[in-house]
Image (cartoon, rainbow, N blue to C red):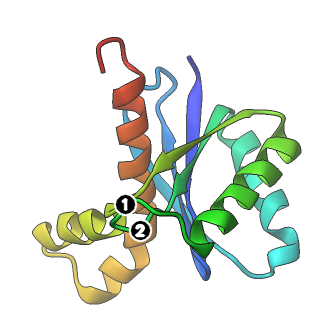
């Protein structure tokens, strides 16, 4: 299957997670600053190459009622740019409540506020990726 890289888009920071080579387990990788915006796609493409990813997942931020807002349009643009820059398949995955779930997971570990702030984006990306990996399994 190969590694899959996931991006949790944001206006200031983007969380990044990667799967193991078998595509079974997601793990947080890093946080990428959204600025400078003119180099963002190349920085993400470089991470994709470094991790030897064969596919990409981008979180699609939907509103709680399921509608798409301006954040979703920005995520779609990001996915299209990544598809062109890497030549890889990019799948968009509903990311509703992933940030809240990441915050809860970090709280349950007793992480300090500063540590939660540092890790929440990449943990959210890992949750998005794990959801994708689980749904891609036979019978998932």
Image point (65%, 32%), residue name = 55
Instruction: Give how far apart the Cα atoms at labels 1 and 2 are.
Output: 7 Å
Quarter location, residue 65: bottom left
Q: Residue at x 35, y 11 (%)?
A: 138
Q: Of all residues shown, which one is farthest toward the top?
A: 138
Which quarter of the rendered picture does the N terminus lie within? top right
Residue 51 in the image: x percent, y percent?
A: 65, 40
Residue 23 pos. (x, y %)? 46, 25
Q: Which residue is mark 1?
A: 96
Quick check: marks 1 and 2 in contact, CB under 8 Å? yes
Q: Residue 58, position in %: x, y?
A: 58, 50
Specify the label residue 77 is tagged with: none
**Quadrant position of residue 48:** top right
Residue 44 is left or right of residue 113, and the answer is right
Quadrant of residue 109 within the rendered picture: bottom left
Q: Secondary structure at mark 1?
A: loop
Residue 46 in view: no
Left or right of residue 130, residue 11 in this image: right
Number of other residues with Cα within 10 Å of mark 1, as a class: few under 14, some 14 to 19, many 20 or more: some
Foreground: 32 or 135? 135
Whether 46 is drawn above or below 87: the answer is: below
| Front label number (1 vs 2) | 2
Comes first in the chain, label 1 or label 2: 2
In the rendering, which numbered label is found on residue 63?
Answer: 2
Residue with the most extreme bottom position: 114
- Dot 2 surroundings within 10 Å: few (below 14), some, or many (20 or more)? some
Count of picture labels:
2
Q: Nearer the viewer, residue 52 or 98?
A: 98
């Amino acid at each position: 299957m190969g590694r899959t890289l996931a991006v949790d888009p944001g206006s200031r920071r983007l969380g990044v997670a990667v799967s193991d080579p078998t595509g079974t387990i997601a793990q947080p990788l890093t946080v990428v600053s959204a600025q400078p915006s003119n180099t963002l796609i190349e920085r993400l493409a470089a991470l994709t190459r470094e991790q030897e990813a064969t596919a990409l997942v981008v979180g699609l931020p939907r509103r709680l009622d399921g509608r798409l807002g301006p954040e979703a349009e920005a995520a779609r643009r990001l996915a299209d740019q990544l598809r062109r820059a890497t030549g890889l398949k990019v799948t968009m995955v509903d990311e509703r409540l992933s940030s809240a779930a990441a915050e809860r997971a970090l709280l349950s570990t007793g992480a300090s506020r500063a540590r939660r702030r540092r890790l929440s984006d990449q943990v959210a990306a890992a949750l998005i990726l794990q959801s994708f990996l689980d749904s891609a399994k036979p019978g998932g």
